[in-house]
Image (cartoon, coloured by chain):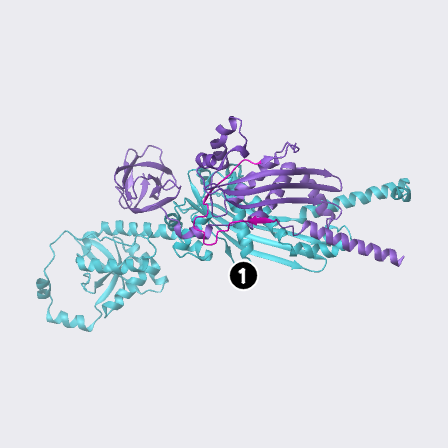
Amino acid sequence: MYFYKKINFTYDNRSLYSHLVNAVLALTLVFQSTACSTNLKSKVSGNLNQLSKQQTVAILPVEILKKGQEETGEMLRQGLYANLKGAKFNLLERYVVDGLLKQHNLHNPAEFLKINPMQFAEILGADAVLITRINKVERSYLVIHSSIEIGISAQLVDTRTGEILWRAEQTEQDYQGIAKIPTGISSAILGPIQFVTNKLNLHRMTSKLVNKLTAIVKNPEDAKKKETFNETLISSAATRDLKKIKDVEKLKNEWIDDVSAYTEIPSDVIDQKETFLTKPHKKQESLPSKINWRQRKTSPKPTIQQQEKNITTAQKLKQNQFPQYTIQVGAYKTKENARQMVNRLFKKGYKAHIKPELKQGTPLFKVLLEKFNNKDQAYDLANKLTNKENLPSFIVTTASSPTKP
Amino acid sequence: MKLLLFKNFKYAIAVGLIAVTAVGCGKANISVYHGTEANWDYPKTVAILPFSYDPAITEETLPHQILRGVLFNYFSYLGYTDIPIKTVDLKIAPLIKTGSSIKDISNAQLMELLGTDAVIRGHLINATNFTAGIYAETSIEAKLEMVDLRTGDLLWETEHTELSTSSIVTPSLIDMIAEQTANAEVDKAYHKVAESFILKILEKVPDPASLRHEHVQLPHIISIDSNIKKNAQLYPDDVIYVSMKGDSKLDAHFDIGSYKTRIPMKEVSTGLYTGSFRLKKGDQINSSLIIGSLSNKKGLTAKKFYKKGLVFIK
């Protein structure tokens, strides 16, 4: 009553009042739209639709970048479980996930992205894994203004193919303070304090963030074109290992084509080679590092006595004076292909060279690497090539026949 | 004049503190009668029964169902094996149809019907939702309890009221408008309050997860084999054969990448499963691995990749 009596509604006053109301409304709208800001980048693969209740997804423990984010990590994972309970796929229960990870000594979520998804399939029995990370949890307080910012990233990977089914990055920010038009002096002072200190606010924000984040996963068919991957994306860990499988198979095929060019490798050499090639991968079961070399069938294997007979004293002297071992990494029908391989190795710092030979009248270009006096040194490098470069190889003598240990 | 200012300031501080307290740290009181500490026989399977509600509650939005749904979603985070709500409802439906109310069903009957170690019962005492200009409120008052069906023991119980209000004591005008608008969406408002309710409860509910970690065991697959060797290209009408050795009497299937999944396998002798898939014209499979799976009755599945070859279709 007092309020209405005080304002004398003349025409000018009404106009002023109307402008004031409009300005407040406009401001309110502006602040409302910016008050709680979300920056969500999310993309899904068309194959996400194929996950059904028959498929199981494991939500892995959340990676945190700083100490003190553990609680937010738990909140996030809890929220993901609760939200994705309504998704089209099954969730592998948390205690099962944690129990199996613990049994396999996988305690560090920071390592999860480096692990081949296929390995997760065998460890957890899940069809897909959800890997998440908290990028930031920032609370700031400046007397009349406080804010909380949470940033996370998530990636859902199909463990059967390594395909990334969903990838998202989201930042959620909210604040309390003068910009939100406090309802009084006390609110202006106490509001910001309450905002950053109350755990419930962080919980609410996390909950809100998860709701927005998972919306597209729950209903992937609603994804717009810009929210869909243009092409199939394979996780780097899976690409690495699939590439290994393919490379090994490709090399096998290439080498099988030229198999008759190779001198027969004695079986004991094969055994030794397989041992040192497979040893570093013991932990990574998923890598087929075993290479079964085909043996040349063109001529019978000479006996050791015959070989010894064939080596003249001069040759023996030569072998003792010069490097005796080298590593063969390929044999090509065209020089161009061999040169490409040499260039590739050269860029990586290896000294490779081409050795042209004739095989039944057809030219063959062998790519050889380094020269060694000592067989162990050759083994060391061959081992390195397998582990570091994923390059199958074998040791040959400079006389171009594979070495016998 | 000074006195008036001082009084106003005191009032403002008081209102502010009330606001902080009201919006802030309300905690749920939960009485835990049996914890999980070294208790190996703590219930592992749990069913959340339909919640009863006070006849005075006439809400069309059925807040008791919202609360039950939210509890189910969040409860799955704890180390219990919980039965989906729909399954629970289907299993107890015959008894409800005969006129029995949830309260009347004995523990023994529930155990027989549901096959779980424990149940959670819930009763909605009160629920409110109204938006009135400068004041808006949504609240849920409920009683929850978890009962061990094997012994009849009450494991924990709680009676809690979760309240969300928005009024002139809200710190800012923007928040006030946002909260009032949100409160008008009744379903969402109840959902939000139910979430706060359940999160507070679950902080104190015993969690047997750590007790179960060591006992999680997937079925065992010894080996998997196939007729696919290296990168051989396949053609329509070619048949992929897969055999797998592992634990016997389980459900077995194999996948070709994610392209063809759950192709059934049959146990042809103890622990030996075989299955096949004939390729059809139009099948587009490129660099796919074959994955064998073995599932037990607990719903746990083991997987093993066949790594000696990839499936390509010409």
Q: Which residues are magenta?
A: B28-51
Q: In terms of image quadrants, where is residue B7?
A: bottom right
Frontmost residue, B249 versus A380: B249
In which quadrant of the rendered image does the C terminus of chain A lie? Answer: bottom left
Residue A352 belongs to magenta span? no
The secondary structure that most of the magenta stretch takes on is loop
Residue at 48% x, 54% y: name it.
Answer: B37
Q: Residues within 10 Å of mark 1 (few under 14, many from 20)?
A: few
Q: Under tag 1, what secondary structure?
A: loop
Relative side of A252 to A181, left or right: left
Instruction: Report which colour depicts chain A.
Output: cyan
Tag 1 residue:
A67
Residue A243 relative to residue A108: left or right: left
Give the amino acid at mark 1.
Lys
Is residue A352 visible to us here? yes
Does residue B37 show up magenta in the picture?
yes
Determine which quarter of the picture holds residue B239.
Answer: top left
